[in-house]
C-alpha cells in the first residue's frame, strides 16, 4: 500500500539532546513537508522540499534541520536550539505544492 | 497579510442536528482550498479540494462550498462518528508551494 510512514510514533528527548524524526513515502511524490501541531492549534510549516537536495525554511524553522538526499525520505532533526520542542510533528507529501497533501500518522515528541 | 481563519473553534451538536463550519481566507489569488478531517492523535485525512467560486463537493454527510472569500463545510444529519477536528488550508500567494492551515474546528456530535 502506498503511503507515508513516520517513526517513531512517540519520542522522548532529554534537554540538550538532538533527536531525528523519520519520514518515508512510497507515493513517488516530489514534494515533502514537515509541520508542527500544538494542542488546539492548526499546523505550522517547519521546512519543505520540492526536489531532492533542495529544501526551504517554513514559518518556524529555528531549532530544526532537515535533509533530502533521497526522493523517498525527508528526516527532521530537532536540535537543542529548539527551546520548546514538545509537540505533534506531521510529515506530508504532494505531487506539487498546489495539490492535496497526504499525511503520515505523526510523531509525538516530549521533552523529559 | 495572507491568512486562513476558521470558525467556530469548537462546535457541539446533537446527532441529526445539521450545521456549518466556516473557513475564510485572504489569499489574493486562490490556487485551491483544501478541507481535512483529523482524529485525535492521527494525521489529517484529505476530504475535498475546491478551486473556484460556486464549486461544491459532497461526500456522505459532508458538503463543501466555496465563495470568493470563504468556504463552508456543511454537515447534514451528523452522526457521532463525524466527531473530529476539521481543518482547512490554502497555498499562500507568496510563491511558496506549501499549504497554510487554519486552526481548525473541533466538532463533537453527541448521540
Image (cartoon, rainbow, N blue to C red):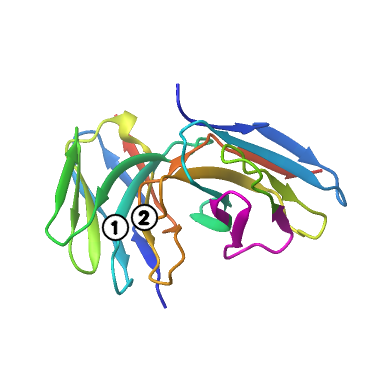
- In this view of the protein, which residue sits in the foreground, A94 or B32? A94
Identify the image quadrant of residue B6. bottom left
Asked if disc 1 and disc 2 are in contact, CB closer than 8 Å, the reply is yes
Q: Is residue B69 magenta?
A: no
In the image, is residue A80 above or below residue A21?
below
Of circles 1 and 2, the one toward us is 2
Q: Chain of mark 2?
A: A
What SS does tag 2 mark?
loop
In the image, is residue B68 above or below residue A98?
below
Classify residue B61 as left or right of residue B47: left
Which percent across, then down, holds residue B111? 29, 29
Residue at mark 1 to residue at mark 2: CA–CA distance: 7 Å
In the image, is residue A48 above or below residue A22?
below
- In this view of the protein, which residue sits in the foreground, A93 or A40? A93
Residue B32 - label = 1
Q: How many marks?
A: 2
Instruction: Kindly give the residue lying farthest to the left in the view shown.
Output: B54
| Segment tinted magenta in the rendering | A48-65
Q: Chain of mark 1?
A: B
Classify residue A87 as left or right of residue A48: right
Q: Residue at x 42, y 54 (%)?
A: A97
Amino acid at each position: 500500500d502506498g503511503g507515508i510512514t513516520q517513526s517513531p510514533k512517540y519520542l522522548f528527548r532529554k534537554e540538550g539532546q538532538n533527536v531525528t524524526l523519520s519520514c518515508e513515502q512510497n507515493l513517488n511524490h516530489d514534494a515533502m513537508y514537515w509541520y508542527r501541531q500544538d494542542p488546539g492549534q492548526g499546523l505550522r510549516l517547519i521546512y519543505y522540499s520540492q526536489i531532492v537536495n533542495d529544501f526551504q525554511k517554513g514559518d518556524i524553522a529555528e531549532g530544526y534541520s532537515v535533509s533530502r538526499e533521497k526522493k523517498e525520505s525527508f528526516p527532521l532533526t530537532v536540535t537543542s536550539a529548539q527551546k520548546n520542542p514538545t509537540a505533534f510533528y506531521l510529515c506530508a507529501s504532494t505531487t506539487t505544492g498546489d495539490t492535496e497533501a497526504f499525511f503520515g500518522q505523526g510523531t509525538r515528541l516530549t521533552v523529559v | 497579510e495572507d491568512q486562513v481563519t476558521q470558525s467556530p473553534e469548537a462546535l457541539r451538536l446533537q446527532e441529526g442536528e445539521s450545521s456549518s463550519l466556516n473557513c475564510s481566507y485572504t489569499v489574493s489569488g486562490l490556487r485551491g482550498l483544501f478541507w481535512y478531517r483529523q482524529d485525535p492523535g492521527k494525521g489529517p485525512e484529505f476530504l475535498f479540494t475546491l478551486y473556484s467560486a460556486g464549486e461544491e463537493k459532497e461526500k456522505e454527510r459532508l458538503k463543501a462550498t466555496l465563495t470568493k472569500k470563504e468556504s463552508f463545510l456543511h454537515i447534514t444529519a451528523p452522526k457521532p462518528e463525524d466527531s473530529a477536528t476539521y481543518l482547512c488550508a490554502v497555498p499562500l500567494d507568496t510563491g511558496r508551494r506549501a499549504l497554510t492551515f487554519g486552526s481548525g474546528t473541533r466538532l463533537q456530535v453527541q448521540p
